[in-house]
Image (cartoon, rainbow, N blue to C red):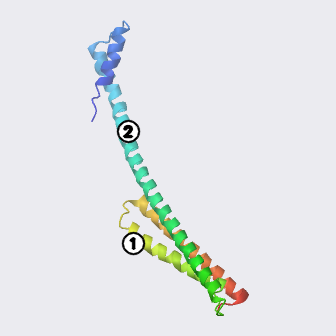
Amino acid sequence: MSDYTKLPRDIADCMKRAGSPLSEDQKLLLAGYLAPVQQKLAEAQEENERVRQANIHTVDVFEDMKAAKEKAEAQSEALRQELQSHLTAQYKVGVDYSEAFILRQQAEALIDAHNAMSDSFVLEATGVIQERAIIRCQDFLNNYAQRLRQQADEAERAGGEK
């Protein structure tokens, strides 16, 4: 803990220099009044530092989640491009990958990213804030995969899947 007599001594010295010195009783009374305020200030500073450290950790977790999301998007895009190149090549031999098929493959890539994130981040996550952030990111991936599946279903209804 801090020395709660420093501020009252500094005030007493200031008053002495100003020409109005404090008596010993006044110094003790001043120290008594200021001690709880100084204690609350010290506690608030400690709490502020704890919250600051937690925020730094949370930002790190979000940056990791952002990197995982970008990786999943890159994998999805790579799969889309690979399927597109297969689609282009397969037209020559008569095989066609429909839009529904591509959407389902993208949904599977997102689920793979979700599972990879679960494996890598859950081991590192400590604390409620980080767990909530991971769950939110996983929910996002699941919801996005579900939307892709719905789009695939709509594409099937519109034109059929081969």
Above or below — where is 106 with respect to 121? below
Q: Residue at x 67, y 87 (%)?
A: 156
Please tell me how crowded label 1 is: few (under 14), some (14-19), or many (20+) other residues with Cα within 10 Å: few
Q: Tell me the quarter of the picture where residue 118 sits.
A: bottom left
Left or right: 118 as drawn, with respect to 103: left
Q: Nearer the viewer, mark 2 or mark 1?
A: 1
Above or below — where is 19 with respect to 32? above
> What is the CA distance from the residue labelled 2 to the residue labelled 1?
37 Å
Q: Tell me the quarter of the picture where residue 104 sits.
A: bottom right
Q: Residue at x 27, y 29 (%)?
A: 3
Above or below — where is 141 with respect to 46? below
Q: Considering the image in quadrants, where does the N terminus appear?
A: top left
Looking at the image, do the residues carrying marks 2 and 1 touch, with CB atoms under 8 Å apart?
no
Type of the residue with mark 1: Asp
Q: Residue at x 55, y 69 (%)?
A: 73
Left or right: 33 as drawn, with respect to 72: left
Q: Considering the image in quadrants, where does the C terminus appear?
A: bottom right
Left or right: 50 as drawn, with respect to 111: left
Percent coordinates x, y for residue 134 in the rendering: 45, 65
Q: Which residue is mark 2?
A: 45
Q: Which residue is mark 1?
A: 119
